[in-house]
Amino acid sequence: MIRRLITFLITAVVLAGCDLIDYHPYDARIRTDTEINRKNIERIESACEGRDTIRFIMMGDSQRWYDETVDFVDNVNRRGDIDFVIHGGDIADFGMTLEFKWMHDILSGLDIPYVAVVGNHDLLGNGLAVYTEMYGDLNFSFTAARTKFVCLNTNALEFDYGADVPDFTFIKSELEADRESYDRTIPVMHARPKSDQFSDNVADYFHYMLRQFNGLMFCLHAHDHGISAADIFDDGIIYYGCGCMKDRTYLLFEVTSDGYEYEVVEY
């Protein structure tokens, strides 16, 4: 009887204390949502099906700026006129699991879906494993209102230029897939060509490949922590860069069958 009582008490203490365990910040075991991009892409494509106009936000580099991101979410939810948000990468600062979780806890408060490309800081530590578990593939695409978004990992430096970054096999497969299903294309990446993260040896070919997509409109990126609009290759294709959350700004785009407009929003 005494032995059973002792066993019961030990078990009760262990079970009661499970929530008190403080896991290592680089522990890659995920205790939050997974497949976030896939699930939210389904929501985006369903909501935008059959439409000819979309309004979306490009933001990025939230990293350590949690309070500013909370205010961003509040600002977007008050608007009520946005279809989805694209996070341009650097969700985390040091690739720690808890950083990803904390930021997703904030961004999941959006009333609209969001997707996130991978940033160079997201790949530090165990970040690669955490990002792929939480968000999915490093390269992905989706279509909203006949506009194709091609989202790419361009952080070559984090792979020591030894991997296929950018992944031209993926880009070619996207070029060959369902060309009748979209009229316009918007590539999205964290680091733009000719930045410190990008492999200069493939910059021209990368841009050439992007130009093969139907109706290439413009390209989007983060990483530089500043608003920018640059015709990097002098051919009329603008690479728009968003600021970091520290600066309390984001880019708002409206895309129609006739073209697009954008504005810099301060909040």
Image (cartoon, rainbow, N blue to C red):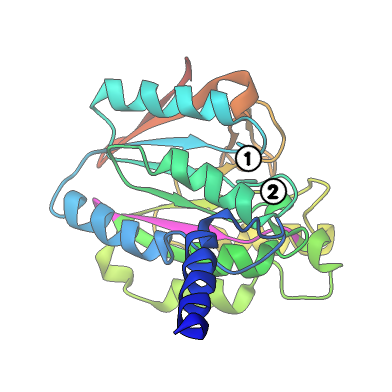
Numbered range of the magenta stretch: 144-155
Q: Is residue 92 visible?
A: yes
Instruction: Describe residue 198's horizontal placement relative to residue 128 as left or right.
Output: right
Foreground residue among 238 and 67: 67
Instruction: Describe residue 47's horizontal placement relative to residue 13 as left or right.
Output: left
Return the mark for residue 64.
Answer: none
Residue projecting furthest to the left: 50
Q: Tally the marks.
A: 2
Residue 159 lies, in percent from the top left, at 80, 68
**Badge 1, how many Cα within 10 Å: few under 14, some, many 20+?**
many
Secondary structure at numbered mark 1: loop
Residue 145 lies, in percent from the top left, at 24, 50
Foreground residue among 145 and 92: 92
Residues at marks 2 and 1, CA–CA distance in whole angstroms: 6 Å
Residue 231 is one of the magenta-drawn residues:
no
Indicate the quadrant where residue 64 lies.
top right
The residue drawn where x is 30% and y is 27% is: 77
Instruction: Describe residue 26's horizontal placement relative to residue 3 as left or right.
Output: right
Query: Mark 1 belongs to which amino acid?
Result: Ala
**Badge 2, how many Cα within 10 Å: few under 14, some, many 20+?**
many
Residue 88, placed above or below residue 41? above
Secondary structure at numbered mark 2: loop
The answer to whether mark 2 and mark 1 are in CB contact below 8 A is yes
Q: Which residue is mark 2?
A: 191
Q: Is residue 136 visible?
A: no
Assign the N terminus to one quadrant of the image: bottom left
Query: Mark 2 belongs to which amino acid?
Result: Ala
Residue 146 is one of the magenta-drawn residues:
yes
Q: Earlier in the sequence, mark 2 or mark 1?
A: 2
Residue projecting furthest to the top: 267
Q: Which residue is mark 1?
A: 222
